[in-house]
Image (cartoon, rainbow, N blue to C red):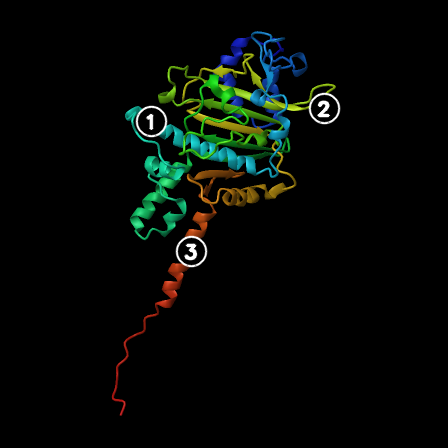
Amino acid sequence: MSDKAPVSLLEQPRLLSLLLEAKTTSDLGQIIKSLPIVDESGYTWSALDPSTGWQPGRLHWVPVGRDRGNAGRIQLAGEPYNPHAERLINGMEALIELARRLELLKDPQATMPESPRDAVERYFGLPRLDSIPRISDKAKRRALETQLREMRKKLTLRVEFSKKQNEFIVEIRDHGIGQPADRIHETLLSLGQTDKADKPYLIGVFGQGGSSAYAASDYSIVLSRRAPECLDGKADAVGWTVVKKVIPKGRRDPYYAYLATLPDGRVPSIVAPPSQFPHGTLFKHLAYDFGRQGSAVARTLYYALNHVLFNPVLPYDLYAMKADPDAMNGTAHRLARQARRLELDRVKHLYKPFQSQPVGNAL
């Protein structure tokens, strides 16, 4: 399809399917070619007047955070695994925020939870994850372990590898509150901005999040849909965009940009049935650079995430280049399970019953 593809293509559920199916930079490249995108050399975003040079009906590359000097902040992460921990925390917050909003719909006077752990216990009935293996009541412990398995399905991290393209793909998906399409540029694509500071039940504050993952990826796809109960009169649609690094010709200041549909930075959206993309957010990073890890990526990621998220408020599933997930409850939970096994083994070995022996007359 030519560069003059009809704008209506942006609203087709077929486009959403293509974005969800994309696994490599080659896949995404074909999608980008089919869209009416102004080349980065044909439009330069300006904070003073972003509408200058804007071509209505076409997509333009706008700096993430609407900041041409964003490269330094986005490239902060020292380890390729850390941004994913940040994104997982964002996913946990999205699940908590959805529960909080649903609570307020039932009772507008409901007080805020005092902390993230307080929120998780109130909304999901989960105690500290490392306390679960220590519960002596077997029925209660098994019920909580079942609840953990169901909870992990709402937050997943998936890593795959394309041998044909020699590329890693990383996907972080949550089924939390999601974002309205017309606010994604102010939330998921913001830098150093936050609406969490007055919410003690959320974790992050500074708004940097996992944006450093953009620096380790050739392209990133962002999709989000607001939970239907929390639309507040806004349209029910899937907001989407693509993030990449832009290197301006003749300049020394590269930056990270995303596809926008309006000069104010709003992203395009797709009207599609919830069955195609339920509420929540998906970050998909293509050609992700894990450094010189090779085949050890899956094992290193498992231990790194369990270490960084030592005792997370909510669990998640890790699909590390295999069909079955690893249960990610944090290293504290793993240590508690090990301690319980050692305690049971110690009791079992210390308790050594002997057969009754007749006592004869010693004389």
Which residue ends up furthest to the front in the rendered image? Answer: 198
Identify the residue under disc 3. Answer: 339
Q: Amino acid at mark 2?
A: Arg
- Quadrant of the image occupied by residue 273: top left
Between discs 2 and 1, the one toward the N terminus: 1
**Residue that protrudes farthest toward the bottom in the picture:** 363
Q: Residue at x 40, y 45 (%)?
A: 129
Residue 26 location in percent, x, y?
62, 24
Whether residues under marks 2 and 1 lie with C-beta atoms below 8 angstroms apart, the answer is no
User: In front: 293, or 63?
Assistant: 63
With 243 as the anchor, is 100 left or right in this view?
Answer: left
Query: Residue at 35% of width from left, 70% of height from top?
Result: 352
Label 3 vs label 2, nearer the camera: 2
Instruction: Give me the C-alpha separation between circle 2 and circle 1.
Output: 48 Å
Q: Amino acid at mark 3?
A: Ala
Does 151 appear above or below 357?
above
Observer-nearest of 32 and 90 = 90
Give the residue drawn at x 57%, y 28%: 23
Q: Give the residue pinned by disc 2.
A: 252
Q: Quadrant of the C terminus?
A: bottom left
User: Hey, what amino acid is under mark 1?
Assistant: Leu
Give the x, y percent position of residue 177. 41, 26
Question: Counting residues from the N terminus, which is met first, the one under dot 1 or under dot 3?
Answer: 1
Q: Is residue 257 left or right of residue 135?
A: right
Residue count near mark 2 (Cα–Cα under 10 Å), binned few <14, some 14–19, many ≥20: few
Separation of residues labelled 1 and 3 (CA atoms) = 38 Å
Residue 42 position (above or below residue 300): above
Q: Which residue is at 38% across, 28% downward?
A: 98
Q: Which residue is mark 1?
A: 102
**Mark linked to residue 158:** none
Judged from the image, the secondary structure of the residue bearing numbered disc 3 is helix
